[in-house]
Amino acid sequence: MKDKPPSVSAYIREQIEIYGDELALPRPGFTPVVEDEPVNPVELWHVSNTLSELEQGISACQKCSLGKTRKKFVFGSGKENAHIVLVGEAPGATEDQVGQPFVGEAGHLLDKILAAIQLTRDEVYICNILKCRPPANRDPLPGEVEMCLPYLEKQIELIKPAFILCLGRHAAQTLLNSQAPLSSLRGKVHAWRGAQLLVTYHPAALLRYPQFKRETWADVQLLRRLYDEYLHVRQIS
Ligand code: URA
Ligand code: URA
């Protein structure tokens, strides 16, 4: 015949006898020590009211492995309330060193493209789908885009631009949630959360394939025309 199991109080008495004060059961009046690592941390960047608050909230991000390999987090640069936001793919080697978007060779070409439509980078806002450089400039991985996209969405929400210009396939396909080739996404105006979104070739692609410059020229001319109309309507209303 099996022994009757001890009552709970007998069990506890026995445990106290064996372990004394080390008994791992809360006593009345015992206040548990809260570990300083919350199980589900509240992410304060969600409630940022300014770009610099957002930057402070996310620039130590370690949500994907790029956090380990980046030199600098590349948040974005330009005018806080710009009417036009340019979205590229991800920082390259120079951007990773400097911490600013489009400051390498592709960036120099971007400056020329902007100058061709009488814009400077101070009048617009420039950022990327990914804030950290993928090693060896490989394509962004879907998981990296998934982790990083909410940051860009919040950034755009704060800037409230009238226009978004996607530079290259990755930016365009990500924001438009489309698998369509760049050639079919460019040359038209897409509605994106209250903004007009246009697509053109990535300046790095133009360095390799100069034959795309003609279409890029047409794309940015279209942006300039729409922007002028927008400014005109704002002025008279
Ligand atoms: N290419 C990009 O897509 N973004 C940069 O910031 C630099 C190069
Ligand atoms: N492929 C890309 O990834 N980007 C371009 O701009 C053109 C082709």
Image (cartoon, helix red, strand yellow):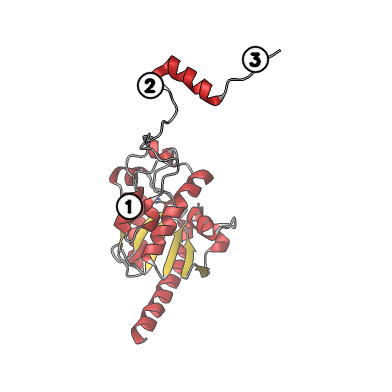
- Judge left or right: residue 4 versus residue 54: right
Mark 1 or mark 2: which comes first in sequence?
A: 2
Q: Nearer the viewer, residue 38 or 52?
A: 38
**Residue occupying the point 33% across, 39% down:** 71
Secondary structure of residue under mark 3: loop
Residue 33 image point, x, y percent: 36, 34
Give the vertical position of 68 relative to 183 (above or below).
above
Mark 2 or mark 3: which comes first in sequence?
A: 3
Q: Quadrant of residue 21?
A: top left
| Residue at the disc numbered 1 | 55
Q: Nearer the viewer, residue 92 or 70?
A: 70
Secondary structure of residue under mark 2: helix
Label 3: how many Cα within 10 Å (few below 14, some 14–19, many 20+): few
Circle 1 or circle 3, nearest the eye: 3
Instruction: Look at label 3 and name its amino acid.
Output: Asp
**Extreme residue toward the right, this view:** 1
**Residue occupying the point 42% across, 40% down:** 66
- Judge left or right: residue 134 versus residue 7: left
